[in-house]
Amino acid sequence: GAGVSQSPSNKVTEKGKDVELRCDPISGHTALYWYRQSLGQGLEFLIYFQGNSAPDKSGLPSDRFSAERTGGSVSTLTIQRTQQEDSAVYLCASSLARGPPPYEQYFGPGTRLTVT
Amino acid sequence: AQSVSQHNHHVILSEAASLELGCNYSYGGTVNLFWYVQYPGQHLQLLLKYFSGDPLVKGIKGFEAEFIKSKFSFNLRKPSVQWSDTAEYFCAVNAYTGGFKTIFGAGTRLFVKA
């Protein structure tokens, strides 16, 4: 079946512009995660959605970052007034979150964001 | 708060050498533990996972990991590495804290010399 897809695969933007990154999770997966992967920094947790519960936004680095998940499926991560330090690969993952754990995450290919 | 520490950031081995990558986590409750791998140019994918039962977990491609609760550790091992194991390896911890947020370690880049 189809895996997690993300778009665009690459995005180059000028400092100060807003960007939107999209994630299509695996059908039926109720949990969705966004991470940021920078060189030498590993995977930095950004935000987590689970079903209809309020999202866990504890990893968002500033109020310029926001995310939404419409209809329990597609998610959009928005970065406003981008800065050069926002340059990274943004990864989305989805998982089941019902039934017995552990809940393996399935990752998308990522969006490489470059802020010039 | 949960945290995951991977001790080695870069490891270089020759083929057939044995591998052990360290992972320690901080969380006092019940945890799910994972190792994920990212081969060059590919998505992150699951290598192995632990929730309960036998603390020695076997994964794909000959990898295994041992959960030692008293040490809060989940080290990854492979008796004999191959050139194709060159990749970045991430340890991850997932615990119920009102939701199942997963925290990843910083990753270990493994390079295996042919």
Image (cartoon, rainbow, N blue to C red):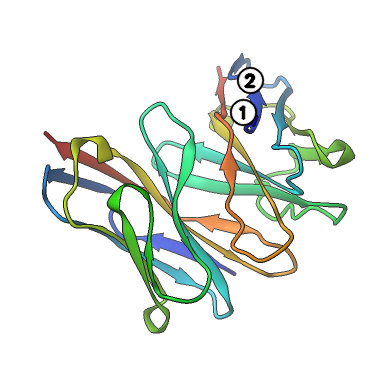
Residue at the spot 38% in from the left edge and 55% down from the top edge: B59
**Residue A15, label in figure:** 2
Whole-percent x, y for residue A51 in the image: 83, 52
Q: Can you say whether A3 is above or below A45 in the image?
A: above
Residue at the spot 74% in from the left edge and 52% down from the top edge: A57
**Direction from residue A58 to residue B58 in the image, left or right:** left
Kindly identify which chain the residue marked by label 2 belongs to: A
Please state, as top left, top right, bottom left or bottom right, where the N terminus of chain A lies in the image.
top right
Residue at the spot 50% in from the left edge and 38% down from the top edge: A37
Q: In the rendered structure, which disc, 1 or 2, sits on the residue that comes first in sequence? A: 2
User: What is the crowding at mark 1: few (fewer than 14 residues within 10 Å), some, or many (at least 20)?
Assistant: some
| Relative depth, front residue between A40 and B76 | B76
* Label 1 to label 2: alpha-carbon separation: 5 Å
Q: What residue type is labelled 2?
A: Lys
Residue extending furthest front?
Answer: A1
| Relative depth, front residue between B46 and B25 | B46
Kindly identify which chain the residue marked by label 1 belongs to: A
Residue where numbered disc 1 is placed = A83
Pointers 1 and 2 in contact (CB under 8 A)? Answer: yes
Residue at the spot 39% in from the left edge and 41% down from the top edge: A40
Q: Which amino acid does label 1 sit on?
A: Gln
**Direction from residue B17 to residue B86 in the image, left or right:** right
| Relative depth, front residue between A96 and A53 | A96
**Direction from residue A40 to residue A3 in the image, left or right:** right
